[in-house]
Each structure stands twice: as C-alpha cells, then as structure tokens.
Amino acid sequence: MRSAVALHRLLDVLPVFQGDHRIRRRFTLTPGSDFGIDALAVLEAAGARTVPWRTALGTTYDLIVAASPKGPLDRLRGPLVLLPHGAGFNKTVSGEGAQDSASGLDPAYLIRDGRPLAALHAFAHPGQTARLAERCPQVADRVAVVGDPTLDRVLDSRTLRDRYRTALGTGDRRLVVLLSTWGPESLLARRPTLPEELCHELPVDEYQLALIAHPNAHSDPGSFELAERLPREVVLARPHEEWAAVLVASDAVISDHGSTALYAAALDRPVVGAYDGGTELLAGTPMHRLLGSVPRLRAPGELGAALDAHRPGVPSAAARTAFDTALRGRALERLREELYGRLGIEPRTPAPVPRLLPVPRPPVDPLPAVHGVRVEVAGDLLSVERRPARADGPPPHHLAAEADAAGARAVESAGLLYRTSPGDAPGLWLPGEWTAEALARHPGCRTAGVILSPDRCLVRRRAAPDTVLESRVEPVREGDRLLLPDPAAILSAVHALPDAAFAGAVHTDFGCRVGPRTYRVRLRRAPATTPSTTP
C-alpha cells in the first residue's frame, strides 16, 4: 500500500481470502508518498499486522496485491496483482508521469526497466482494457475484467439506507453531499467557501449537508483541521467506509471531477457538477461524460433549479462506462478466481459476499441549537423557514434558541427559548413551570416552550403569562410513513401568532408549512396536569 486511499481499496477486496487459514495477510507501506501516515493509522485501528519495508524487501511472497503502481514495487519479490483505487481512470496528476496519461495507466509506472511491473491488472470495465492496450501495449495480455468490489458493497448496502439516514439525523430532509477530490483543481481548493454558502442558502428543515473528501484531502491538513474549516452543520464523512454509507443515504451530490461521483451515478442519484475546468480531467473518460451530461452549479442559489433539472437514468448511463453491469455483485467471486489461480491453489471456503457498510457515526449537531427564523403569514397558513443564526440575507422574524444547548449570548438574544422535557424521569423539573421561569430570567424572551413529544409542546407567552397553551401537530402520511416536523419549528410558528391567540383564547387551529409539507396544528389551553409533568 502507498496511501490511505489505496489501503481502503485493498480492505474492500480482502474478503476473497476470508476464512482460509492457509493465507497469511501482511501489509507494508511503500515509501515515497506524502499520504502514508493515515494508512498506518487505519491498519493499527484494524489490528492488522504490518511488515517494515526493509523486511518486506528481504522476503519472497506468493502473491503481492497493490492498488497503485507508484513507488518501488519492482523491488518486492513475488507476482504482483494491480487493482485500481478509484473508478474510471479519469485524472492525470501534475508532475507525475506523462501529462496526457491517466493516473494508474501511465507506462512510466507500469513498465520498469523494460519489463511489465505487474503479472495481472484487475479492471472493472472492458473499456479500461482497451485504454491500457492503447497506452501500454506491452501489458495488454495481463488483464482480467473482474468488476468493482467497492461498487458491490455500495449496491448491496442500499437496503440499509433508512438506517444510515436515521444515524445521520437526516429525517425527511434532502441529504446533499459535496464530493471533493484532492489537489489544486478540487472543489475544496477551488471553492472552499461553498459549504458555508450553501448553509446560508438552504433551509435546515429541507436540507442536510455532508462532505465526502478524498483521503488525501484528510491526510494533508488532518481530519481535525478539515473539520474545523467546515460549518458545524456539515457532516464530514470518514474516508474509510463511512463515505460510502453517506453516499447510500444521500439524495443528491455536488461533485468536482473526482471519481466518487461515479458511485453516486451508479445509484442514479442526481449529480450536479461543480468542476470549473483545468488540466486534470481527461476527455472521453467516464467522469468527463458524467459532468458533461448533468447540470452545473455556478452559484449556491441555483441548487434547487439544478436538482429539478435531474433526468433519471442520465447519471447511471455515465456510470455504465466505468462499471461492467454484467459483473455487478460478482466482483469478489471473479477476483477470487484470479487470485487463487495465481496462488495455484483451490479455495476451500464459500464464495465471498460483499460486506455491508457500517452505520455512520451520529453527527455532533444534527440540527443547530440556534436558528434565524423567517415566518410568512397568509391567512391561517404560517410558513416557517429556519437557517443557522449566522446566515446572511434579510433579517429573520426572530431568533430561536435551545436553552440548554445554545450559548449564553444566543439565549439572552432569543425571542423564542425552548427545551425538551426529560419525559417521565422524576424530580427534575416541571415543564409548565420552566416556561414561567424562562420568561422571568430572560427579559428578551417573548415566548418559552417545552417539547413534550414529537407532536406535542407546551408554550407560554410574555403577553399572557398566566396562560399555558398546548400545541399538537397532526402527522402527514406519505406512503407507509407518518411524517412530523421538528417540534421546534412548530414553536417558531406559535411564536409568530398574534398575542390575541394567547390572551383568553380557547383554541386556535392553523396550518404550518415546514420544508415541503404543510401540517395542521391545534393550539389549546393546556390541562392543569399533563402526562409529561413530574408530580
């Protein structure tokens, strides 16, 4: 292995040997890469056995498997099988090999001292065989088309999509994923402010944002530094496995010229291009075809129109130029045939199946604790639109803050304060009494609310401090699902009601539009004792 991205690909293919006690797996770090340290960290976390490079040079191996032809691999002793560590061979890397040759197909790396480096090149699509024969005819007879094991993992994990979205806190929002490769032409290098601009533009009840960055984009600054450069609302996927689970969970992607978009295209997700051109993307490659067939994002405010322009089937058509559809689901099986054939032994274990992708980590902040809220009133319909409180644009109707999750400055400035009831836990606090205390302690607060359940809240207004109202939301049915909004968005709608709705009112019914859906809300005087109030 030479880098984290190459190691991740190797970990995807190792199940071909699973259960075979005759096979010993050893890893070594090929010198010469600036991105090797993260690979060693992944191996340490996995408990894998590593061999120092000097030791590896003194050992003869029955089989060597690598996912990059770069580095002094020719010094190792044993037959070498080369795998691609991406999809499609789309880019040329400045300063490495021929400028017009795709990284991974460059003769400068595939031929060493006049001899082919690898005994076998395992490809995902027959078109890659033709490209190799054109660029490096000396190795054209050392090719096998086996499919893409990583794609098989992605496709086989589609049944876990709802589980992934639950872990990410997505709910019924549209999960839009930014895809960035590495280097000077990447999305993060060319448009570093795009994540923040999208946070400003997109209402949080309609969209969730995530970033999948190339492992090298993690390695260069470090994952901590990369996360610090992003808004807190953007989910940063880990570069091993989690990226693929986030892709399965996604509703759409915004991509530069990195090959990760081809996996989204294979899922037929809407793909929006954000590559501004340059010298790295090679004409005629799968990524070139994909970006030429999908809408482009020139400004954050155009995202909605770009997503509406998605034509089902167009992304997947481009993906078929990178992945052989006849081999989908069979990559590990085909690769096992080739690798055991090189070893000269027969497999003794059942045919391997793709490992399902693990569930992503829950994000630190699924929703912000402070929102700038705009409310539009049209008769008995109130439309609520929430954004992070720092978002630019017209002044919001009010600031809403979660009292026990936001900072002191936001709590003191908020017109609406709310928190979630601890439920039936005894001896903590009384929801109705907390609303009175919040109004008394925070002079800037006009409305205080407590979320009792996903469909029920208590609320008290400064203009009518002796009246506690209870809001109930009717869920919206879509297919086999009953959908409810974030209760805090309903509290913002109640906050926007005129004081007359509180002062002496017996009941108030209104429609509340949150995101793309409209819910019916009933506002009534709260009973003297509610089931969620502690005794």
Image: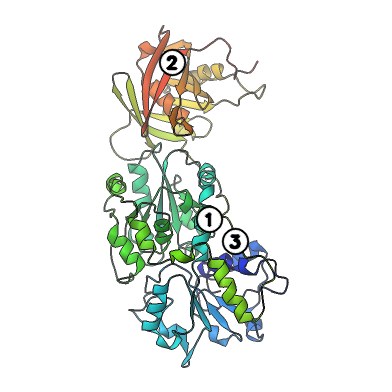
- Labelled disc at residue 156: 1
Q: Quadrant of residue 399?
A: top left
Residue at x 37% of width, y 71% of height: 91
Tag 3: amino acid: Val
- In screen coordinates, is 289 left or right of 448? left
Evaluate if marks 1 and 3 touch, with contact meaning CB atoms under 8 Å apart. yes
Residue at horizontal 32 percent and vertical 22 percent from the top? 381
Residue 302, above or below 492: below
Q: Earlier in the sequence, mark 3 or mark 2?
A: 3
> Mark 1: which amino acid?
Asp
Q: CA distance from mark 3 to mark 2?
A: 54 Å
The earlier-in-sequence mark between 2 and 1 is 1
State the residue position of label 2. Answer: 523
- Residue at 45 percent of width and 83 percent of height: 109
**Residue under numbered circle 3:** 353
Query: Residue at (57%, 68%) from the top-left corner?
Result: 333
Give yes or no for contact between labels 3 and 2 (Cβ–Cβ under 8 Å): no
